[in-house]
Image (cartoon, helix red, strand yellow):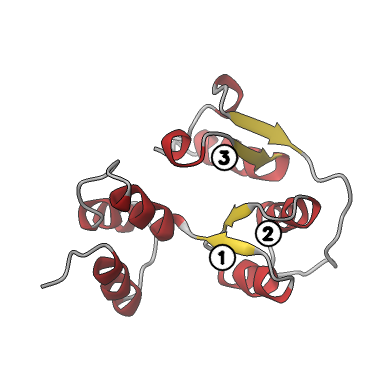
């Protein structure tokens, strides 16, 4: 679905490491090195101060966003989103990607995918769930 929506995706090396750690714990993750539409890269410079609560993946996503103006960042971390907003970077989250996929016809319904994400540990507040379902046109 990501390839259909965005053609090419740049994955920071820190995110690739995090995916590898998840895979080692038994989670199913995309094989980044094997996908021609996924480009693994490192940020050229560290633009961000060392913020203790910001993960390496989020920090490198933001640094790459600063290096590549006009790019769309995918960030779910609240602190990462606040920092991206301060730098005036454009971002969405996993749920925003799902809404876009539905709007473009790549997904029939968002709600079952959100339920599956919750079942795999993604915390989604009731308010966010309601807002996303409304954006997806899945509320009565």
Gap in angstroms between the C-alphas marked 3 and 1: 15 Å
Provide residue 6's location: percent of width, then percent of height: 51, 41
Nearest to N terminus: mark 2 or mark 3: 3
Residue at image coords 48%, 32%: 30
In the rendering, which numbered label is found on residue 55?
2
Quarter of image, res 140: bottom left
The x, y position of residue 81, in whole percent, is: 60, 69
For residue 1, the mark is none
As drawn, 67 above or below 126: above
Q: Is residue 25 placed above or below 132 in the rendered structure?
A: above
- In this view, the residue in front, 17 or 11, is 11
- Foreground of the two, 122 or 24: 122
Percent coordinates x, y for residue 101 in the rendering = 35, 48
Work out which residue is located at the far left of the displayed protein and give it.
Answer: 140
Image coordinates for residue 27, horizontal then vertical, percent:
44, 38
Crowd rating for badge 2 (residues with CA inside 10 Å; few <14, some 14–19, many 20+)? some
Q: Nearer the viewer, mark 3 or mark 1?
A: 1
Mark number for residue 19?
A: 3
Residue under circle 1?
A: 77
Going by the picture, which residue comes out furthest to the right? 45
Disc 2 on helix, strand or loop?
Answer: loop
Q: How far is the residue under mark 1 from the one under mark 2?
A: 9 Å
Query: Where 35 sits versus 42, above or below?
Result: above
Q: Residue at x 75, y 69 (%)?
A: 52
Secondary structure category for the residue under label 1: loop
Label 3 environment density (alpha carbons within 10 Å; few <14, some 14–19, many ≥20): some
Q: Are marks 1 and 2 in contact (CB under 8 Å)?
A: yes
Front label number (1 vs 2): 1
Q: Quadrant of the N terminus?
A: top left
> Few, some or many C-alpha atoms within 10 Å of disc 1 (few <14, some 14-19, many ≥20)?
few
């Amino acid at each position: 679905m990501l390839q259909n929506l965005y053609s090419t995706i740049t994955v920071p090396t820190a995110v690739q490491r995090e995916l590898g750690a998840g895979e080692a714990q038994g989670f199913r993750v995309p094989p980044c090195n094997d996908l021609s539409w996924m480009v693994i890269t490192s940020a050229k410079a560290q633009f961000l101060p060392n913020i203790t609560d910001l993960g390496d993946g989020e920090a490198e996503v933001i640094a790459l966003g600063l290096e590549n103006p006009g790019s769309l960042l995918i960030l779910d971390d609240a602190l990462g989103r606040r920092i991206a907003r301060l730098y005036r970077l454009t971002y969405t989250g996993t749920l925003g990607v799902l809404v876009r996929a539905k709007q473009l016809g790549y997904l029939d319904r968002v709600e079952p995918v959100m339920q599956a994400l919750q079942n795999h540990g993604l915390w989604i507040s009731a308010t966010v769930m309601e807002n996303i379902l409304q954006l997806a046109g899945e509320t009565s």
